[in-house]
Image (cartoon, grey):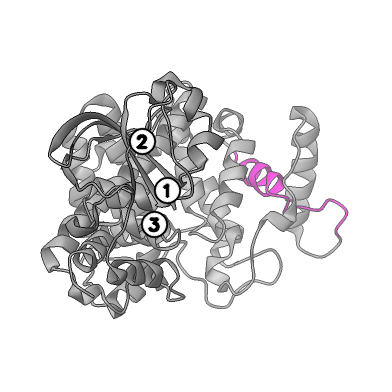
Amino acid sequence: MEQLMHYIWQHRLWRSEDMVTNDGRHVRVLDQGLLNTDAGPDFFNAKIEIDGQLWVGNVEMHVRASDWKRHGHDHDTAYDNVILHVVDKDDAPVMRTNGERIPQLVLQVSPLFTRSYDLLVGSRQELPCESVIRQVPAITITEWIERLAFERLHGKVQRVRDLLDMYHGSWEDVCYVTLARNLGFGINNEAFDRLARRTPLRLLHKHSDSLMQIEALLFGQAGMLDPAATGTDAYYQQLCREYAFLANKFSLHPMEPEAWKMFRIRPQNFPYRRIAMLAHYIEGSFRLMNDILEAHGEKELRKLFQVELTGYWSNHYSFGKPSEKPQPALSNRSIDIVLINTVATLYYARGEISGDYTLMDRAVALLESLKPESNSIVSAFERAGIDCDSALTSQALIELKRSYCEARKCIYCKIGHRLLSNAAHRDD
């Protein structure tokens, strides 16, 4: 509730006629002050007229006036310069440390604002504002989506920074973990991330001249090999034996097989072939980051991921019976996803960290050139009337859905803010 009160105060969403202290003095806010997110009063350096007299100081807010004493502010000199106490419920007077009474005001807004807020945060719709979003000007939505696209990119940059710290500045290691994670295509992202971290590139490089040993390490570490299993699959048995030897040599410990999700996944999307693809990149030494940086344009980038698996995985989706109609390791749509989540992310992160704005521009240009992702989030916004014409926009919509809609942070969303601001300034 206090966050909502901060929001109302910060954006001046009150009605002037309701701005009256509990002892009947009219309040006119000249400057609502600066929101404080640290310890101390909620707003610094406000300028307020109370019955025509100018006051300059801080503003403190509580749901109940009695919270002032409960929080010990009546004995804290840091709150002596509070010029106005704003509350939702006036259940007690408030005093400075010297016993002087502080003006107090019950913050009120229009009933329409309250109803609009309750409808948004209490909505059971996938998008809280789905039924009213068309009331928001297109320019507001466009500007917000553009900002969200970069907000999402910056969030991914932080993940890359963390990996760089972990791998002591090795961009190839960062690329390896980032690619592995994104080969999970959402449903198995965490499992692939764990696999890559558990099977470091330096270990794989020791065996980069043997595709079979690389696959043995990756499938073994993924918990997909069972030395006790019996059957007629000779390659599977060979991998089991090789992993048993390597695990003993390097003291390796596999993941739990339960980490991998297979339910309702088409065979061509099984993680087995994704792991085989990862092994393909490691064979002969992993240098994908260098290849990405040297690629010119989308066409060359696509060629990097148009992989044809050979040997066992040329006609298998998993261990066991071969497939009659093998598919490419990645479909064109899947390559789009890799370009969006791996290549564009690495371009932007490398550019931001090194100060190379050309790389950052390459990331944005790539996202603008790619088709939007096809998923339930994009579909929901399109049904609500928001067009999605590129991967840059679809990334922004994913950020909007996950960071604002699902958390019901409507007061921090520019769309929600516009709707609530309109409601606050309209009569019921």
Q: Determine whether label 3 and label 2 are within 8 Å by CB.
A: no
At 50% from the left and 59% from the top, the residue drawn is 186
Residue at the spot of label 1 = 2
Between the C-alphas of marks 3 and 1, the distance is 14 Å
> In terms of depth relative to the viewer, which is nearer, 321 or 298?
298
Which callout, 2 or 1, points at the residue further toward the start of the chain? 1
The reply to whether residue 167 is visible in this rendering is no
Residue name at image x 42 percent, y 61 percent: 408
Residue at image position (43%, 36%) is 94
The region drawn magenta spans 210-229
Dot 2 amino acid type: Asp
Asked if labels 1 and 2 touch by Cβ distance under 8 angstroms, the answer is yes
Residue wearing tag 3: 409
Could you tell me which residue is drawn at 19 percent across and 43 percent down? Answer: 362
Q: Amino acid at mark 1?
A: Glu
Q: Indicate the position of residue 116 as horizontal and vertical percent values.
A: 32, 70
- Considering the numbered disc 3 on the image, is that residue within a helix, a strand or a loop? loop
Magenta-span inclusion, residue 221: yes
The label shown at residue 42 is: 2
Q: Nearer the viewer, residue 373 or 292?
A: 373
The C terminus appears in which quarter of the rendering?
A: bottom left
Count neighbours of disc 1 (C-alpha within 10 A) and say few if under 14, some if 14 to 19, many if 20 or more. Answer: some
- In the rendered structure, the answer to whether residue 227 lies left or right of residue 340 reads right
The residues tagged by marks 3 and 2 sit, at their Cα atoms, a distance apart of 20 Å
